Structures are given as structure tokens and as C-alpha cells.
């Protein structure tokens, strides 16, 4: 009947007792209302045995609560307990809005698709998985970026801000790629992320400006924009192509070069996010 998350018989018993006390009933009276002997209802209330669904449904009708509440508490508790069971406790502590968002999604979609409800009217675990996946990567990406940038700013203060930004993007995207494949780094595991950064910084290729595969335009632009003279030549070529006028910084215009070069971090991020198949669709199809 239940999935990975199982009801806690003691908590179920406490909720039954809460209703009994709110209705000011004795164990005998409460048991009579539910069609049970005193010893039987007592075993459920004390948490010795888990109350079966038929008993819980009678208690739900009697109290106005739902069967889901008796088994798992409020729907937010149910969602939170399930995600905590999967190892996402740290993320939930920092982002309590996740459970509220999944709850909202459930109530707006459940009327259209009864398949997302379990036997007690709460979202099936697959529904929670899908909703959580929609927000998990975004939150994890933000956490990785903040951790990487924080470490670089603290440990590499002598690096130019431009190189710090670029290294932050490159290393963050590598970590996200590793996470998507291995799922071995979780939210809150800051030390694992920092160790990844240390390893990247100790690799010789990261001690200098990186050169990118320039088979496609994105890599080509990244390499050009890493050099002021090449950037100036590129702007001049564009100017000649569109205005028939040559461009030079001899009498000024360095601001334009700086603006073009400011695109480099965004291009690096794009380069890291796309694979060759996607770039093939952009530039060769």
C-alpha cells in the first residue's frame, strides 16, 4: 500500500490520541465509535500496532481529518519526510519553499490526473520525484557556483577578477557535469566541492588561460576574446563587413573592446553547458 516512506506507528497512535482527547472520549468510547474493542484501540493509540486503513478511514470520517494526515501528518510533513529519506535534508533546511511548491503543484494537477494520488490521497512518490527534479538542479547549481566562487575569492586573491570569474564558471560547470553523472556530491557537502576545486586548480592547464576547442564559433570567440589585439581585429573585420570602415583603438575605442570581452564569461558558460551534438545542430545542419 505504501511506498518507500512508511507510516510511523507511534506517530499514528499520537494522532489518534489527539483526536480522542479533542473529542473528550475515553478509550472505550473512542473504540466504540470506531467499532473496536478497548484493547484493540489502545494498542493503536499506544503505538504498539499500526492502525489499518479501515480504522484510519473511520477516524478520518469521525474527525474531519484525512487518512493521509493520520498516517503521515500534514502534506508538507509527508513531502519533507520523503525527501529527507532520500537524503535531501540539508537542501530542505535551506529551501523550505520546496515542499510548499510541490504541494501547490499537487493541488493544481491532482484534479486533472488522479494517478498522482496514493491510497490515502497524498501525492505518489513518483510525483514528488518529478517535482523535486524540476527545482533540484537549479538550487544545486546555485550552491555549487556560490561555493566555488567563495573559495576562489578567498584562496586566489591575486588573480585578476576576469580570470576569477572565468575559472569559477569553468570549474562550476565541470562539477555540475560530474554530479549529473555520478550523483556523488549532494547539497551541503561543501568540502567535497572545495576538494574538486583544489584538484582543478592543481592541474597545470588551469594555471594559465585555457584554450578552447574552436571547431565551432563559440570556442573560437572565447579564444579571440581572451586577447585584446585579436578582439580588436575581430571588431575591425565586423566593421568592415557591415559599414566598410576600419576599426582601431589607436585614437580611442578601447571601451568597445572591453564590452566585447565582457561576453567571454557568458560564452564560457554556454560552451560548458552544450555538447557537440547541440552545436552541430546550431552550426552545421
Image (spheres, grey):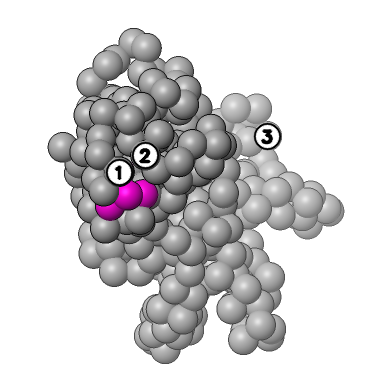
Label placed on residue 245: 3
Which residue lies at the image location 26% right of the left edge and 48% below the top edge?
A: 39
Label 3 Cα crowd, 10 Å radius (few <14 / some 14-19 / many 20+): few
Look at the image and tell me in which quarter the C terminus lies: top left
Label placed on residue 28: 2
Q: CA distance from mark 1 to mark 3?
A: 96 Å
Nearer to me, 212 or 135 = 135
Nearer to me, 102 or 191 = 102
Q: Is residue 279 depicted above or below 185 in this figure?
A: above
Q: CA distance from mark 3 to mark 2?
A: 96 Å
User: Along the horizontal axis of the image, is 182 left or right of 87?
Assistant: left
Q: Are marks 1 and 2 in contact (CB under 8 Å)?
A: yes
Which residue lies at the image location 59% right of the left edge and 64% below the top edge?
A: 146
Give the quadrant of residue 133.
top left
Q: Is residue 22 depicted above or below 188 in this figure?
A: above
Marks 1 and 3: which is nearer the front? 1
Look at the image and tell me in which quarter the N terminus lies: top left
Judge whether residue 127 is colored magenta. no
Amino acid at each position: 500500500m505504501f511506498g518507500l516512506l512508511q507510516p510511523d506507528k507511534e506517530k499514528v497512535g499520537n494522532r489518534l490520541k489527539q483526536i480522542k482527547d479533542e473529542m473528550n472520549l475515553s478509550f472505550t468510547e473512542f473504540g466504540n465509535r470506531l467499532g473496536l474493542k478497548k484493547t484493540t484501540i489502545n494498542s493503536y493509540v499506544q503505538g504498539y500496532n499500526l492502525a489499518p486503513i479501515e480504522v484510519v478511514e473511520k477516524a478520518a470520517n469521525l474527525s474531519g481529518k484525512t487518512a493521509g494526515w493520520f498516517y503521515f501528518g500534514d502534506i508538507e510533513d509527508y513531502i519533507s519526510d520523503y525527501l529527507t529519506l532520500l537524503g535531501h535534508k540539508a537542501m530542505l533546511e535551506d529551501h523550505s519553499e520546496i515542499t510548499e511548491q510541490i504541494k501547490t503543484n499537487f493541488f493544481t494537477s491532482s484534479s486533472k490526473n488522479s494517478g498522482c494520488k496514493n491510497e490515502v490521497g497524498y501525492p505518489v512518490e513518483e510525483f514528488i520525484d518529478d517535482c523535486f527534479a524540476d527545482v533540484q538542479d537549479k538550487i544545486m547549481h546555485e550552491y555549487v557556483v556560490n561555493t566555488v566562487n567563495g573559495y576562489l575569492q578567498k584562496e586566489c586573491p591575486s588573480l585578476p577578477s576576469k580570470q576569477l570569474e572565468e575559472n569559477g564558471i569553468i570549474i562550476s560547470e565541470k562539477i555540475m557535469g560530474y554530479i549529473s553523472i555520478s550523483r556523488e556530491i549532494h547539497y551541503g557537502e561543501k568540502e567535497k566541492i572545495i576538494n574538486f576545486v583544489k584538484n582543478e586548480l592543481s592541474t597545470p592547464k588551469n594555471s594559465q588561460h585555457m584554450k578552447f576547442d574552436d571547431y565551432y564559433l563559440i570556442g573560437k570567440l572565447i579564444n579571440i576574446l581572451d586577447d585584446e589585439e585579436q578582439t580588436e581585429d575581430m571588431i575591425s573585420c565586423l566593421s568592415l563587413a557591415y559599414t566598410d570602415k576600419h576599426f582601431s583603438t589607436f585614437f580611442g575605442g578601447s571601451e568597445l573592446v572591453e564590452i566585447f570581452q565582457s561576453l567571454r564569461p557568458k560564452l564560457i558558460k554556454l560552451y560548458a553547458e552544450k555538447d557537440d551534438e547541440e552545436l552541430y545542430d546550431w552550426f552545421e545542419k
